[in-house]
Image: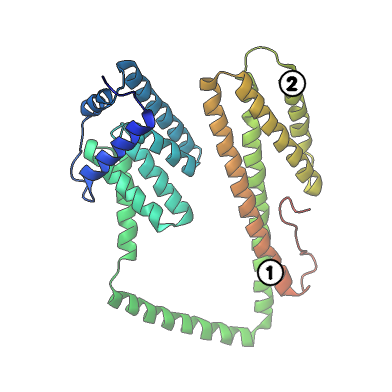
């Protein structure tokens, strides 16, 4: 009599079989999908359970692709790994992992993420040699390696040349500075002007990111059929708050944004409770991606404020039109 089927035990067994067969070379594929199915049946799985498990793998992969589009790279990796733990040869499964790790590497510069991007890209090419995502990931990584792969002799030569050029620049700058202090003053003011423009531009990006998130909210509420008083109340409150954002500035805007974020969080919970899971899931992923972009742009704005404030302090009040600025959401 066949043993009772256990999904986690099956997935762990698959991971062990795949790992032992591959080794470090990635030169062979240990089992076909039909062979995986035979293994599962031998472990007590029914045909219906096999089909349901494969559907689950596709659902996880679709979520991973949505997370990737929304730049939620860690969540994309998590769902893609769930998909490939069920079916290691799921089409595009390893290419999504490769792309997510590649983007994570570009964003955070973690060598481990680069290595995993390369590993999963090569793994995808074992089952689909023409996969463009995997090919592009490997191409980008190889180009980066070539740029950073100069031999030590070349590096030393570049360092020496760079040092000579830097010395010439510094000497020239010193001569010019000593002969013309007015130019130095003008340069300091130009740096302030540039920093202020960067700060203003970055603030626009923050507000644009917030607007993009807010524009998704009607679709979120529209995903729920029927009338729900608590959800309708939240919808009205959110509409009122988004309208107030247009004319709000400084601490007043920060207060409204805080209230709006809380109302949206409450609305997402209710939509999950009342809405159809398949219709709501993608919308929630997209909104989460938009919220991640808001946080990213806020951080970039605060970095711009930091650089601007440094220049204001360095000028020691010489340019009275420029004042220290508060960070985003700073009380």
Which label number is shown at residue 326? Answer: none
Q: Residue at x 65, y 22 (%)?
A: 221
The percent coordinates of residue 245 (x first, y second) are 76, 38
**Left or right: 206 with respect to 128?**
right
Instruction: Name the image quarter holding residue 38.
Output: top left
Q: Quadrant of the N terminus?
A: top left
The percent coordinates of residue 82 (x first, y second) are 40, 35
Query: Extreme front residue here?
Result: 1
How many other residues sit within 10 Å of disc 1, few (<14), some (14-19) or many (≥20)? many
- Out of 81 and 68, give the one closest to the viewer: 81
The percent coordinates of residue 5 (x first, y second) are 34, 24
Task: Identify the residue under disc 1.
Answer: 311
Q: Residue at x 58, y 36 (%)?
A: 288
Query: Extreme left residue here?
Result: 28
150 w.r.t. 280: above or below:
below
Q: Residue at x 76, y 37 (%)?
A: 259
The percent coordinates of residue 44 (x first, y second) are 30, 22
- Nearer to us: label 2 or label 1: 2
Label 1 sits on a secondary structure element that is: helix
Of labels 2 and 1, earlier in sequence is: 2
Task: Identify the residue under disc 2.
Answer: 230
276 w.r.t. 319: above or below:
above
């Amino acid at each position: 009599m066949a043993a009772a089927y256990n999904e986690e035990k099956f997935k762990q067994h698959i991971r062990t079989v795949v790992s032992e067969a591959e080794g470090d070379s990635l030169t062979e594929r240990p089992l076909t999908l039909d062979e995986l199915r035979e293994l599962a049946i031998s472990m007590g799985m029914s045909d219906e359970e096999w089909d349901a498990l494969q559907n689950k793998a596709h659902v996880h992969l679709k979520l991973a692709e949505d997370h990737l589009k929304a730049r939620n790279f860690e969540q994309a990796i998590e769902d893609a790994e769930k998909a490939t733990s069920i079916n290691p040869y799921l089409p595009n499964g390893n290419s999504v992992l490769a792309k997510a790790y590649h983007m994570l590497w570009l964003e955070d510069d973690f060598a481990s993420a680069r290595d995993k991007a390369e590993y999963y890209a090569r793994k995808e090419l074992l089952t689909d040699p023409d996969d463009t995502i995997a090919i592009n990931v490997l191409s980008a990584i190889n180009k980066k390696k070539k740029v950073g792969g100069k031999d030590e002799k070349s590096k030393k030569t570049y360092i020496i040349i760079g040092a000579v050029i830097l010395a010439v620049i510094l000497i020239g700058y010193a001569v010019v500075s000593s002969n013309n202090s007015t130019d130095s003053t003008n340069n300091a003011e130009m740096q302030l002007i540039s920093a202020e423009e960067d700060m203003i531009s970055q603030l626009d990006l923050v507000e644009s990111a917030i607007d993009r998130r807010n524009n998704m909210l009607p679709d979120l509420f529209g995903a729920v059929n029927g009338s729900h008083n608590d959800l309708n109340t939240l919808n009205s409150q959110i509409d009122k708050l988004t309208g107030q954002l247009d004319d709000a500035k400084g601490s007043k805007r920060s207060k409204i944004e805080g209230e709006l974020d809380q109302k949206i969080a409450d609305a997402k919970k209710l939509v999950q409770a009342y809405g159809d899971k398949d219709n709501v899931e993608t919308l929630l992923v997209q909104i989460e991606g938009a919220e991640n972009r808001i946080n990213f742009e806020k951080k970039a704005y605060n970095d711009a404020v930091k650089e601007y404030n440094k220049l204001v302090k360095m000028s020691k009040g010489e340019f009275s039109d420029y004042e220290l600025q508060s960070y985003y959401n700073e009380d």
